[in-house]
């Protein structure tokens, strides 16, 4: 397991929130909290950007991904709209979470609610070269969208 440092800064509206942390020993994601003063609601089929009150500095050659919390998805149909959301290494603004309500009932977000997960991962940078792709160089070739079967 590789350990790196994630530097965080709380904005004034997030100062009373707990420090983001892993919720279990084997967790991949760090829970992020809603930095709001009062409850807010997302109507069915609507979406909303929720502030976290955090700015971060990622380790070199890393990105952060915003991912849904499985309990919100299973119980309420609430997920991250652009999942996984990408936070580039050079971004220094507040982390915002775009939640969408796919459920049938309006969803209440309360202050300090855990609303998403942040996963930090290393990035491999590639040199891009233009070339003709040999579609016969693999058995699969150009076949996609279920071409390998359903079971």
Image (spheres, rainbow, N blue to C red):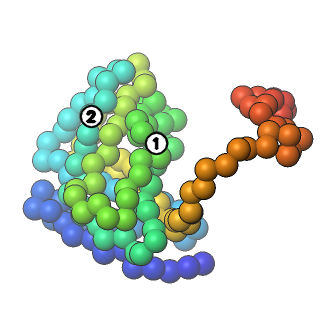
Residue 82 horizontal/vertical position (percent)? 42, 39
Furthest residue in direction left, as rendered: 12
User: Reading the chain from its start, which is encountered first: label 1 or label 2?
Assistant: 2
Compared with 125, 45 (above or below) is above
Left or right: residue 4 versus residue 15 is: right
- Nearer to me, 113 or 97: 97
SS class of the residue under badge 2?
A: strand
In which quadrant of the rendered image does the N terminus lie? Answer: bottom right
Tell me the quarter of the picture where residue 127 sits.
bottom right
Left or right: residue 55 versus residue 148 is: left
User: Which label number is shown at residue 59?
Assistant: none
Which residue was labeled with disc 2? Answer: 48
Q: Residue at x 46, y 71 (%)?
A: 61
Q: Residue at x 42, y 60 (%)?
A: 64
Residue 26 horizontal/vertical position (percent)? 58, 67
Residue 40 horizontal/vertical position (percent)? 20, 35
SS class of the residue under badge 1?
A: loop
Residue 8 horizontal/vertical position (percent)? 27, 71
Furthest residue in direction right, as rendered: 139
Q: CA distance from mark 1 to mark 2?
A: 14 Å
Compared with 7, 68 (above or below) is above
Residue 38 visible from this viewpoint: yes
Tell me the quarter of the picture where residue 103 sits.
top left
Which residue was labeled with disc 1? Answer: 83
Camera-nearest label, 1 or 2: 1
């Amino acid at each position: 397991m590789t350990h790196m440092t994630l530097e965080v800064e709380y904005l004034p509206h997030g100062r009373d929130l707990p420090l983001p942390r892993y919720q279990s020993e084997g967790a991949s994601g760090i829970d992020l909290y809603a930095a709001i003063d009062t409850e807010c609601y997302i109507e069915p089929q609507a979406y909303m950007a929720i502030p976290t009150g955090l700015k971060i500095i990622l380790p070199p050659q890393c990105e952060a991904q915003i991912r849904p919390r499985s309990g919100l998805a299973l119980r309420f149909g609430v997920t991250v709209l652009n999942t996984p959301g990408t936070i580039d290494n050079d971004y220094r603004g507040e982390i915002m979470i775009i939640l969408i309500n796919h459920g049938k009932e309006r969803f209440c977000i309360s202050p300090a609610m855990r609303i998403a997960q942040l996963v930090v991962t290393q990035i491999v940078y590639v040199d891009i070269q233009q070339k003709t792709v040999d579609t016969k160089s693999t058995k699969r070739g150009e076949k996609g969208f279920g071409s390998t079967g359903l079971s």
